[in-house]
């Protein structure tokens, strides 16, 4: 909803064309509909960690029908590969709750806490064929405090994400981001 809020406020020069969830009763679908945003559930198929071929085709078609310019992943816990990434090459952006390349994959905040780092954070990156390996667009640090639990650390990371993601998407929308190999170059405004 931070992205929709930024669009409505004009700080993100874009519009939400479609909200899709792979969870039928996801709260985000209700919140999107309450704001008048198109929202729909699409079944993910038979696999737990990725879309099956039929589901991938359905997602691609729904996004094409909505005429999206950029696919923004937030809380989408499936790996995208193959035809999806070919169809939306360099147009899929993900939010990850750690400072990549450290702690890719699931429960990154818990990985950071268990490892004992003093600083973690959030990363916005382009999605490629790997798991959390695409070019990094922006990062925001979050300190790990003495006495932190996985829940308290995750809550602070989510707070940083709510500012970082819309600001990074705004820089993309304004054409301020240039990808040079694996590096992205832009003036951070976060």
Image (spheres, rainbow, N blue to C red):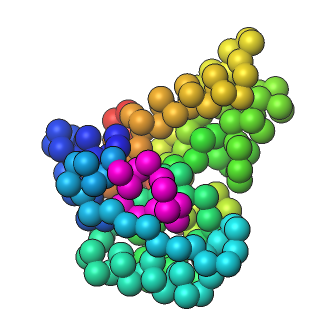
- Up the image or down, 50 lies above or below 52; here it is above
Q: Which residues are magenta?
A: 19-30
- Any part of residue 169 in sight: no
**Residue 114: image x %, image y %?**
83, 31
Q: Is 23 placed above or below 117 here?
A: below
Quarter of the image for the N terminus: give it: top left
Residue beneath the point at 70% across and 42% down: 108
Q: Residue at x 52, y 39 (%)?
A: 139
Q: Nearer the viewer, residue 40 or 155?
A: 40
State how many labels appear. Answer: 0
Membership of 126 in magenta stretch = no
Quarter of the view holding residue 40: bottom left
The location of residue 79, given as percent across then percent down, is 63, 67
Relative depth, front residue between 27 and 115: 27
Residue 38 visible in the shown view: yes
Residue displayed at 68% across by 15% down: 145
Residue furthest to the front: 25
Residue in front for this viewpoint, 35 or 145: 35
């Amino acid at each position: 909803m931070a992205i929709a809020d930024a669009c409505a406020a004009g700080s993100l020069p874009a519009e939400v064309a479609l909200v899709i969830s792979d969870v039928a009763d996801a709260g985000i679908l209700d919140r999107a509909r309450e704001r008048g945003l198109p929202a729909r559930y699409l079944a993910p198929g038979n696999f737990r960690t990725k879309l099956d071929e039929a589901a991938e085709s359905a997602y691609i078609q729904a996004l094409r029908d909505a005429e999206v310019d950029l696919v923004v992943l937030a809380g989408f816990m499936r790996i995208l590969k193959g035809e999806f990434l070919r169809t939306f090459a360099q147009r899929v952006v993900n939010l990850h709750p750690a400072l990549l390349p450290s702690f890719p994959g699931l429960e990154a905040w818990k990985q950071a806490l268990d490892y004992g780092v003093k600083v973690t954070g959030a990363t916005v990156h382009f999605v490629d064929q790997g798991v959390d390996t695409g070019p990094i667009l922006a990062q925001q640090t979050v300190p790990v405090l003495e006495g932190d639990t996985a829940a308290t650390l995750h809550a602070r990371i989510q707070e940083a994400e709510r500012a970082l993601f819309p600001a990074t998407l705004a820089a993309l929308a304004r054409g301020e981001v240039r990808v040079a190999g694996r590096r992205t170059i832009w003036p951070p405004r976060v």
